[in-house]
Image: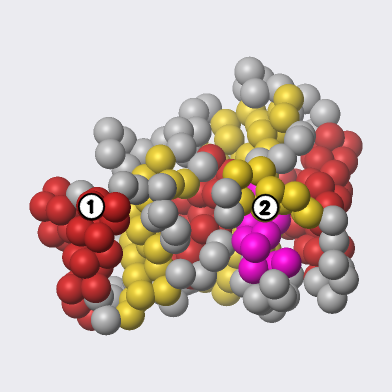
Amino acid sequence: MNNFNKELETASEAVKKAGKIIASKIEKRPDRWQKAPGDFVSSVDLSAEEIVGKIIKEEFPDDGIMSEEDLNFGLDKKRFWILDPLDGTMNYLRKIPFFSVSLALFKNNEVVLGVIYDPYHNNLFTAVNNGGAFLNGKRISVGDISNLVECCIATEYIGYLDSVKKRRLLGRLGEYFGNIRMIGSQALDLAYTAAGQIDIAFLPRSNPWDMAAGSILVKEAGGTVWAPGGYSCLKSGQIIAGNKKLVREFVNEILEKEY
């Protein structure tokens, strides 16, 4: 197993410090602006990004950083970090307690470490390549439900689809699933899937910073992440995560037939 003890310790410290700032400002009304319809960024996102970036640069000056917001450099280096400083900004701005800080280390064309921190509930999800997945230090694993009709599925906004595809897909989801959740943080969708709290995550449009840390959590928890044409955390697009049997059934019964 690769030894990433320092990296894991540093990443955990960084997301917790960012999370402390995020949690401390939830009762305030931070400056915010809209990047795209329904896609907001706030001054808290940028503060959290600054904190994590500073820690990473101090401890690992030779590494690069890819972030959702302003901090992007060194993506041609041997390894770089992939950061979402506040995943679930809309939830945060409305005081809905489901948001997170997501940080992953990318090396040799794969994610080798991931941490997701939920500052509201003080939950830290961690995973290192070939080292298992953990929630607050306790090992976690994906759920063992094997039938779609028994699942609790997490998905996110699909408004960008044209109306025909949207109606068709929503119809199929409603037909197959009695329990559908839209949590509002893709990182938490994947973290909860790794912990077996959610059975399958269907994310129609996921960006690298949304899924990088969550993808290694799911894999190290015994699950799989599927994407059309093959999964890559550097390629934005659709992903499905969960145990292998459920993901295979979802692709065959939902995507290939109706989407």
Q: In the picture provided, is 102 more to the left or to the right than 43? A: left
The residue tagged with tag 2: helix, strand or loop? Answer: strand
Q: Residue beneath label 2, please?
A: 40
Q: In the picture provided, is 168 more to the left or to the right than 89? A: left
Mark 1 vs mark 2: which is more N-terminal?
Answer: 2
* Residue range corresponding to the magenta coloring: 84-93
The residue lying furthest to the front in this view is: 163
Residue 203 visible within the image: no
Residue at image point 64% right, 68% down: 91
Whether residue 62 is situated above or below residue 83 in the rendered picture = above
Whether residue 106 is situated above or below residue 129 in the rendered picture = above
**Separation of residues labelled 1 and 2 (CA atoms):** 27 Å
Q: Position of residue 96 (x, y in %)?
A: 65, 76
Q: Is residue 25 magenta?
A: no
Q: Position of residue 18 (x, y in %)?
A: 81, 57
Q: Residue beneath label 1, please?
A: 164
Q: Position of residue 63 (x, y in %)?
A: 73, 28
